[in-house]
Image: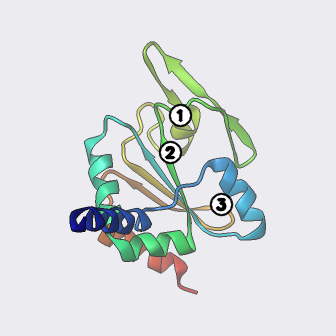
Amino acid sequence: MKFLLIIMLTISGFYFSQLKPYSFSEVEILQKNDPKPVIIHIYTDWCSVCKIELFKLNKDKDLTQYINDNFYFINFEAERTKETINFQGKEFKYLPNGNSGIHELALALAKNKNQPVYPLWIILDKNQRLIGYYEGLFKPKNIAEKLKKIMLP
């Protein structure tokens, strides 16, 4: 019985430290009543750096809580998201290519339009203007420093 209780407490503690992800359409609606900066994390399922990075970020309870309280977080899988996304007044679709493909929005947000670098972090202010662009590993310590600078008055 004690073992079960320990497991349940561990799981619930881990669950509550998770980043709260939103979809693009949810953020669009939320921005109307409660404008906040937006973090878009673009990743792929095959990217091991992406998985390690997100795991480490979710382990940092203070940073996760800070992001959940002050930002809208969009976790965007660039090669498996197939629905049409409306973003900043434009429509973006999935571009199939044989057995794989990529979403137009990932290409639009990336500097390298031929092949985005993953993970890719896009940070927008509450008016959806670009204020941060990071390709590759973005360590929690660096994320925290950047986000706190953004939130300074």
Within 10 angstroms of label 2, few (less than 14), some, or many (20 or more) residues?
many
Residue 81 is tagged as 1
Q: Residue at x 71, y 62 (%)?
A: 30
- Amino acid type for the residue under numbered disc 2: Phe
- Amino acid type for the residue under numbered disc 1: Thr
- Label 1 with label 2: CB-CB less than 8 Å: yes
Q: Nearer the viewer, residue 126 or 31?
A: 31
* Tally of numbered discs: 3
Q: Nearer the viewer, residue 6 or 44?
A: 6
Residue 54 versus residue 148 in the image, above or below? above
Q: Residue at x 48, y 35 (%)?
A: 113
Q: Nearer the viewer, residue 115 or 51?
A: 51
Image spot of residue 142 (x, y percent)? 33, 70
- Amino acid type for the residue under numbered disc 3: Gln
Q: Residue furthest left?
A: 3
Q: Residue at x 56, y 74 (%)?
A: 70
Question: Is tag 1's residue or tag 2's residue first in the polypeptide sequence?
Answer: 2
Image spot of residue 71 (x, y percent)? 56, 68
Q: Which residue is mark 2?
A: 76
Image spot of residue 65 (x, y percent)? 46, 74
Q: Residue at x 75, y 45 (%)?
A: 89
Q: Nearer the viewer, mark 1 or mark 3?
A: 1
Q: CA distance from mark 1 to mark 3?
A: 21 Å
Within 10 angstroms of label 1, few (less than 14), some, or many (20 or more) residues?
some
Q: Label 2: state its secondary structure.
A: strand
Q: Residue furthest front?
A: 1
